[in-house]
Image (tube, grey):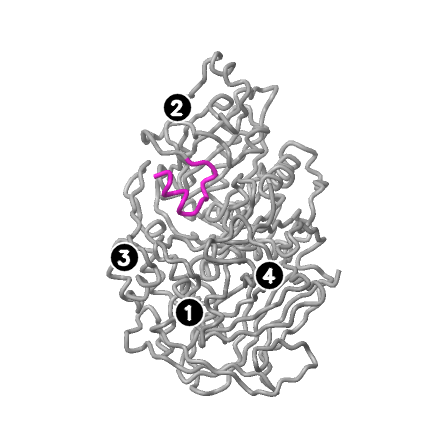
Amino acid sequence: MRNTLLLLLALTLFACTPTQQVTQTTTVTTTTSTVPQQAVTEEVMTTPAENPKAFYNKTEHYITMRDGVKLYVAVYTPKDASPENPYPIMLQRTCYSAQPYGADQYPEDFSRLQELANEKYIFVFQDVRGRWMSEGAFDNMRPYVPNKKATSQIDESSDTYDSIDWLVKNLPNNTGKVGVWGISYPGFYSTCSLIDAHPALKAVSPQAPIGDFYFDDFHHNGAYTLAYWSVNNLFGIQKTAPTSEAWYQFPNMGPDPYDFYLRHTPLSKLDAVTDQDNFFWKEIMANPDYNEFWQKRNIVQHLKNIRPAVMTVGGWFDAEDLYGPLMTYGNIEKWNDKAYNTIVMGPWSHGDWSRRKGRQAVSNVFFGENINEDYQADVEARFFHHWLKGPADGETGLAEAHMFDCGTKVWRDFANWPPEDAIEQNLFLSEKGRILEEGEKTESASTSFISDPAHPVPFNTDIKPLFIPRKYMADDQRHVARRPDVLTFTTEPLTEDLTLAGPINAQLFVSTTGTDADWIVKVIDVYPDNHPDYEETQDNLTMGGYQQLVRGEAFRGRYRNGFEKGVPFAPNEITEVSWKLQDVMHTFKKGHRLMIQVHSSWFPYVDMNPQTFVPNIFEATEEDFQAQEHSLYHAGEYPSNIKVSVLTR
């Protein structure tokens, strides 16, 4: 169980095997596990993070929500807490289990809490409604209910409020100040805590927070994230009673996920191999458009009147949740003039910053030593110390935007994000695979290719069981650059550094012989031929000529007029398709080249478009999947281009 959860999302900040089940009760459990004085003496050379059992007492409780549902919490209180030495509370709410269960059961260590655990807080881990040892029913991205008028109206914000209210009133030796943090789904719950926040809540760090399941995790601009189908059972099967054991199973796709998903196209074939009790899969299939079902689950639209201090954290190579951190920070900044609001974006995949591993790399690319450890000590610990133990005056010494440049591999600080002095620049896609700047002319009208659903463009070269795809975010793109259904555009070697800082937007003018099409645009850093290998470089690759994905994003063309309703293409009619690829902070160094790739499938990261318009792609038949010719236009009134934000200093 432990390895499964860690492999799944690496989201639980400590991970141990669940043991005995807590007996469900309506009364507070006050059993405390203590360590004999002799044991503490023997462990004097260890730290709280290394040996939490020696430094923390554990208790377990059920907290009753306003509608009567009881939620489980595990509480770890420093042994030296007293009325004269109280501690703030650090709360994490999770759907991934507050294990290990049992008042005498401790995690092996608090390594993922390293700096915070050593400084010592009262740590509280809660199973959210409908998960593990808590009562109630689970709902994915449970919609926020504004202006609640009855105790039956609940959401994750009210559950957080009720939990904090109980904790500050009932946990001995707390200071009455609370911090909340969490990664991914716990990041979403952290965001929810900001809305209608309890007065005791002083500091919140949503980390890789899900902002909207239609743009994070399970969809990308209308395209279904097919590679995440394998985790649907985790999110879509209700348990029948509080439990310390997993009640769901993951499917066996065999050794080659590309082959598995190709054999299960159309998407309706997956229905036969999906657990029939999976309510989330049914919801996904029934709601292909950005309709009310998804819209009301958009948490970032509610980030107004924010009172606690906020530090949003994300990774530039986060395959699951890149949209969420940027939108969380951006909307708080837009709607809350007086809020303390900061953002940290590092050279990380999903949740990397919580790990302690010395060398930080994503895919084959090495970014530096002790990046995670330095963040934990100098940024995260400082943020919470200031607001929960320090002066709480906003003078944290932290930058508004602490951003890692993934090209120069150094941190840069900005007064805002995106940087105000970044200059927009258009990169025009031209004939013969060239990239032109504004003012240069292109002669060829268009470039065409055949997109065949039977032979989709792979998103990576690895042939192995696929769980959650992550490393592809910095993978080598040479495996597709040579394909005839991938258009490649490249600059000459740069004569000086080129730093992109901020959003990237694609504006394509296209046509298709079919009635629907997807479009994928990738911005790539092409290394010089003499670039040395790293320790992390795969044996079958060399970093000389490496084509590193810097940013890539899919767009389902039917949603070019809005995500609420898909509309077909008129065959052979030139049409504009525009979308945002998300932000970057990346310097293309002198001697490198900038490459842009354009194609129409990215399999099986996103599902294959049949290229014949059907109202619901989840109901498409095999006959709907047809090879079509797509054209990209360059010249005159149809100048396909990529708009970037360039820093000149």
Which dot, 4 or 1, sits closer to the camera?
Answer: 1
The CA distance from mark 4 to mark 1 is 24 Å
Q: Report the number of numbered marks.
A: 4
Q: Are marks 4 and 3 in contact (CB under 8 Å)?
A: no
Amino acid at pointer 2: Asp
Residue holding disc 4: 583
The CA distance from mark 2 to mark 3 is 38 Å
Amino acid at pointer 1: Val
Mark 2 Cα shell of 10 Å, populated few (<14), some (14-19), many (≥20) = some
Mark 4 Cα shell of 10 Å, populated few (<14), some (14-19), many (≥20) = many
Residue positioned most to the top: 38
The CA distance from mark 3 to mark 1 is 25 Å
Which one is in front, 252 or 214? 252
Image position of 159 with respect to 566: above or below = above
Which mark is first along the chain, 2 or 4?
A: 2
Amino acid at pointer 4: Asp
Amino acid at pointer 3: Thr
Which mark is first along the chain, 1 or 4?
A: 1
Which one is in front, 278 or 473? 473
Q: Name the secondary structure under disc 2.
A: loop
Which mark is first along the chain, 2 or 1?
A: 2
Can residue 202 be seen here?
A: no
The dot on residue 104 is 2
Quick check: 600 left or right of 207?
A: left
Which mark is first along the chain, 3 or 4?
A: 3
What stretch of residues is rendered in magenta? 1-15
Mark 3 Cα shell of 10 Å, populated few (<14), some (14-19), many (≥20) = some
Residue holding disc 1: 457
Mark 1 Cα shell of 10 Å, populated few (<14), some (14-19), many (≥20) = many
